[in-house]
């Protein structure tokens, strides 16, 4: 791409990049979808798509939509031809570190997961051990997908801890003490030899549910993860909202009872001290005289244990107060409830809905839907993939073979 041909070339390159960006965000789209998303004319899009097809960067797939690309245009008769980036355009790795597990997946830019694996990991694993295991898993999924590391354009990595946006380091966290102070992105990048972006787990859940799950097609979404801790991921105008330092969404530390139980953050009466699985399990352990885990809590609840059901209902009402306040401030279209405790279903969701209806101003929740997440315990892993494809321009600045202007 020479400088001589000047602005026309850069205009073409820019338009081409807009089409590629739309495809990496959507996975699969028709030419009409692409025209609508990019604001380019149908004929410009057709020309660009023809060039991308010739270069082998994208391919056509016949007929059926895969449900990921919206359904705005449904002409009677034959379905539109869909196009997507193919694997020569690059691959993406997702890594999800949980409190007790590690998951790794590789996907292409058409949003297809090619290989995926997971294992249990010690609760308080060190960053060093965790990253060594992740590196082994990356080799494993690439081998399973018969893919070469050189085709990977970026790695998204999730951690259940707040991440400092400026430095990339893991901030103080009782959930993952072995990682505190570690520059997780740089360290993982060094071990893997690949560019890595790190994000906290609730933000990844929000991203995954809004790209593939219960928040599809919505631009204003709040995702509430209720597990050992409680956190929120906020999608605003279709993208993650981090706040100035990366702390946006710490709904678990909303104070509900001034002078209440002491929280791991050092404050008292935070939502987390009342409604996290840890808090509920502790109450139930004391009353039963035996250790109750998240799993046994959910089993007791499903078996109709009145104390377990009561505590989950109380947790839902407490969460609902915090969500009502969040709705008054942000007015989302959709609140998605995920995390381990969401497996309790309506026993958790109904009290949340009741409490939100009682405590929010009506105009903030008139059109609000409160729904369970659809992606279960894969949400963070899929979010790590979406982080690279959907949120991070840095991975697409140069490695993508843009070739010559169409
Ligand atoms: Zn707190």
Image (cartoon, helix red, strand yellow):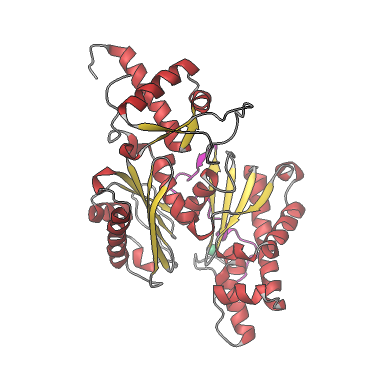
Q: Can residue 270 be seen in this snapshot?
A: no
Q: Position of residue 283 (x, y in %)?
A: 62, 78
Name the residue rendered at 44%, 17% in the picture. 44
In the foreground, 283 or 107: 107
Ligand 1 positioned in quadrant: bottom right
The verdict on residue 307 being magenta is no
Please determine whether, in this image, residue 259 is positioned above or below residue 355: below
Please count the marks in the image.
0
In the foreground, 162 or 37: 37
| Residue 350 in the figure: left or right of residue 254 | right
Name the residue rendered at 31%, 33% in the picture. 397
Please determine whether, in this image, residue 46 is positioned above or below residue 62: above
Q: Main structural element of the magenta stretch: helix, strand or loop?
A: loop
Q: Position of residue 191 (x, y in %)?
A: 24, 56
In the foreground, 372 or 49: 49
Please determine whether, in this image, residue 24 is positioned above or below residue 346: above
Q: Residue furthest bottom?
A: 289
Q: Which residues are magenta?
A: 237-262
Q: Position of residue 81 (x, y in %)?
A: 49, 29
Name the residue rendered at 50%, 23% in the picture. 35
Please determine whether, in this image, residue 290 is positioned above or below residue 115: below
Q: Can residue 336 be seen in this snapshot?
A: yes
Quadrant position of the N terminus in the picture: top left
Q: Position of residue 330 (x, y in %)?
A: 62, 43
Quadrant position of the C terminus in the picture: top left
The verdict on residue 240 being magenta is yes
| Residue 185 in the figure: left or right of residue 203 | left
């Amino acid at each position: 791409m020479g400088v001589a041909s000047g602005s026309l070339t850069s205009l073409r390159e820019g338009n081409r990049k807009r089409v590629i960006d739309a495809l990496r965000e959507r996975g699969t789209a028709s030419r009409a979808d692409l025209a609508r998303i990019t604001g380019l004319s149908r004929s410009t899009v057709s020309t660009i798509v023809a060039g991308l097809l010739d270069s082998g960067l994208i391919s056509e797939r016949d007929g059926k939509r895969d449900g990921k690309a919206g359904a705005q245009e449904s002409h009677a008769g034959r379905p539109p031809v869909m196009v997507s980036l193919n694997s020569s355009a690059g691959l993406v790795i997702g890594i999800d570190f949980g409190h007790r597990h590690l998951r790794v997946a590789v996907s292409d830019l058409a949003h297809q997961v090619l290989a995926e694996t997971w294992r249990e990991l010690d609760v308080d694993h060190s960053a060093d051990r965790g990253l060594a295991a992740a590196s082994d898993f990356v080799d494993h999924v690439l081998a399973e997908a018969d893919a070469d590391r050189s085709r990977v354009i970026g790695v998204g990595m999730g951690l259940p801890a707040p991440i400092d946006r400026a430095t990339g380091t893991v901030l103080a966290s009782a959930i993952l003490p072995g990682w505190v102070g570690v520059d997780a992105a740089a360290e993982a990048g060094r071990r893997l030899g690949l560019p890595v972006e790190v994000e906290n787990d609730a933000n990844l859940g929000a991203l995954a549910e809004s790209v593939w799950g219960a928040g599809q097609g919505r631009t204003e979404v709040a995702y509430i993860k209720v597990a050992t801790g409680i956190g929120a991921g906020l999608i605003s105008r279709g993208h993650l909202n981090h706040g100035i330092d990366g702390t946006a969404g710490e709904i678990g530390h909303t104070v509900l009872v001034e002078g209440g139980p002491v929280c791991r953050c050092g404050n008292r009466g935070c939502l987390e001290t009342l409604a996290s699985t840890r808090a509920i399990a502790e109450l139930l352990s004391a009353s039963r005289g035996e250790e109750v885990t998240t799993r046994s809590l959910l089993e007791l609840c499903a078996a109709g244990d009145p104390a377990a059901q009561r505590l989950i209902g109380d947790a839902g009402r407490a969460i609902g107060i915090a969500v009502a306040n969040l709705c008054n401030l942000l007015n989302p279209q959709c609140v998605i409830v995920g995390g381990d405790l969401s497996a309790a279903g309506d026993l958790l969701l109904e009290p949340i809905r009741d409490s939100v209806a009682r405590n929010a101003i009506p105009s903030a929740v008139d059109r609000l839907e409160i729904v369970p997440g659809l992606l279960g315990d894969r949400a963070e892993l899929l979010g790590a993939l979406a982080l690279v494809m959907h949120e991070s321009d840095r991975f697409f600045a140069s490695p993508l073979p843009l070739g010559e202007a169409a």
